[in-house]
Amino acid sequence: MSSLPLPSPEAQAHSEQLCRLIHHDIALQGGWIPFSRFMELALYAPGLGYYSAGSCKLGTAGDFVTAPEISPLFGRSLAQQIIEIMAQSTPHILELGAGSGKLAVDVLSELERQNSLPERYDILEVSADLRARQQALLHEHLPHLANRVHWLNTLPDSISGVLIANEVLDALPVHLVRWTDARIIERGVASDGTQFVWQERLPQIPALHHLAQQISVPDDTLSEISLAARGLVSSLSTRLQQGVLLFIDYGFGAREYYHPQRNCGTLMCHYRHHAHDDPFFLPGLQDITSHVDFTAVAEAAIDAELHLYGYTTHAHFLINCGITDLLAQTDPASVLDYLPLSAQLQKLTSPAEMGDLFKVIALGKGMAMPLRGFVSGDKSRFL
């Protein structure tokens, strides 16, 4: 990984401290842990994991850029869909993993312009550092709405209104599974004392083995199965009284996810805007993700008696929600204002950027169909 930027001495020491914790955990577990456990510790170990520590993660100074960081048009477009859902359910929004807080600012600003503010905007954020950044940003831009925004430590017992999860599912721990001609094997992590090494064993979790048996792939395929994503969607679905769960992320339906040409899986790491495939590189200083199996997301929700209200591409959803109309509110003659927004819209909707790879899925109960964001470009047949 010599082509990647070197960390500062302090960051290097931070990563080494997390490595010692993971090596100790491996020893406690008898010398082997599933990759899902390694990923959980690398991302979420208290005070040390990538999302639990204080390093800058988003924007040009971080490791990756999300849609809210690219343009306010994203949050403003999403707000149009939120208005429709709240009108049919409850004026309440719950955002999971709110990043820098930029999406909350843009959504609330647009809802205020539309005279459609929610009674509450709740944020569930596992990172104390990100929570502090969100609070600071909201106080800077929308101090008069402070009484409407609340931070939660756990999921509420019941949910009504709109739940937003933008690039949340891709950061949940995944199991790595390899299919051979004779058996199904789980790839996990062992320690040689100083380095992490791959080691394979038979799956120990019955649910993982059962799911792997249902997937038809060529021999020697390596891919991911996310029990955590299924568990989260199921938990949210059982809590939903009325409204919609909106998941926005990069991924595919199962047939494309486990396509023969994708026989090495989708696991990816992001460090200083460089993408690579080594999760053992500087644990705690890089993001580790996998694409989302949206078929699994839909099945988990439907099993909990929710309805599928739509599944489409990022581009179709934003266009359906009026992103081009929002751009048109800026005078093209005002070049300094219009050209940056136009370039941002292209990044959000172009097939070469976020337009096709990212998807939006709506799952819920008690709604009239179709929802605005899914009136055209339906991709449900690909689930």
Image (tube, rainbow, N blue to C red):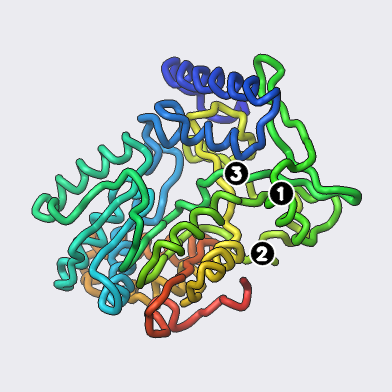
Q: Tell me the residue at 39%/66% (across/down).
A: 240
Q: Is residue 214 above or below residue 53?
A: below
- Label for residue 268? 3
Q: Earlier in the sequence, mark 2 or mark 1?
A: 1
How far across and down, in percent of the image, does residue 68 sit?
Answer: 34, 55
Q: Tell me the residue at 53%/21% (across/down).
A: 21
Q: Is residue 9 above or below residue 75?
A: above
Q: Earlier in the sequence, mark 2 or mark 3?
A: 2
The residue that label 1 is drawn on is 206
Q: CA distance from mark 3 to mark 1?
A: 26 Å
Q: Tell me the residue at 51%/22% (across/down).
A: 18
Circle 1 sits in a helix, a strand or a loop, which is it?
helix
Three-letter amino acid code at the position of disc 1:
Pro
The residue that label 2 is drawn on is 254
Does 61 sit left or right of 3 as displayed? Answer: left
Q: Residues within 10 Å of mark 3 (few under 14, many from 20)?
A: some
